[in-house]
Amino acid sequence: MEYIEIGKIKKPHGLNGELKGTIDERFWGDVAKVDAFFVEQRGEKAPFFIEDLRGTETLILKFEDIDTKEDASLLTNKRLYLRRQDISLSEEEINDTGLEYSFLEGYTLKEEEAGRVGTIQYVDEYPQQEMATVDTGTKEILIPLRAAWIIDVDKNEKLVTMSLPEGLLDI
């Protein structure tokens, strides 16, 4: 079965199992028609049935059987999926994220001087620019994706080399 990523769970909200998250606005019409989101668990997409869903910019969602902050914390930073059959958009509409650098997700980020930094997990749009969330192995850091800082993109090796301002990796 094919699944399409539609958003991300960010962190627990409150003490009763609610979660904060985001959903790509292109999928809102389809989200209103489904009973469950799918979340990857141990390499498989597992259904989580929706008990409550509210908000737009920041989404607050509540799944059935997730009733404590501790249960909700197990879903922190997980991606949300829908089955392809539940999405009304065409393939072209699904693949057009509107982000110039979204193709860099999954690439290794190498800093010109410092060497390997980590893997780009997500590319998100912030008010001023696109930002990469990079997993360094010990923490996640945000790196602005500015054309002036990108030296090379090797699509075969899935490697992006950047020249970052001094101190940016220390934040």
Image (cartoon, grey):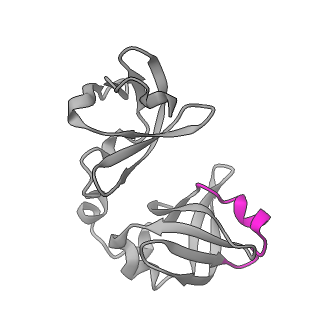
Image coordinates for residue 45, horizontal then vertical, percent = 60, 59
Residue visible at 29% across and 58% down? Answer: 97
Do we see residue 82 in this rendering? no
Q: Residue visible at 35% across and 39% down?
A: 104
Magenta run includes residue 76: yes
Asked where in the image residue 143 lies, by quadrant, the reply is top left
Q: Any magenta on residue 20?
A: no
Tell me if residue 73 comes above or below residue 167 in the rendering. below
Q: Position of residue 93 (x, y in %)?
A: 25, 65
User: Considering only vertical position in the picture, is 37 above or below 100?
Assistant: below
Q: Main secondary structure of the magenta part?
A: loop
The image quadrant that residue 44 belongs to is bottom right
Q: Is residue 53 something one can see in this rendering?
A: yes
Q: Residue 167 at what x, y percent from top left?
A: 43, 26
Q: Residue 78: image x %, image y %? A: 58, 56
Check the image and report above or below for 96 versus 58: above
Q: Nearer the viewer, residue 83 or 14?
A: 14
Residue appearing at x 21%, y 35% in the figure: 147
Looking at the picture, tell me which residue is in the foreground, 106 or 126: 126
Q: Image check: 137 left or right of 158?
A: right
Residue nearest the observer in this picture, 41 or 66: 66
Would residue 5 appear left or right of 100 to someone viewing this image? right
Taking the spot 50% from the left edge, 64% from the top edge, the residue there is: 81
Magenta span covers which residues? 63-77
18 with respect to 155 (left or right): right
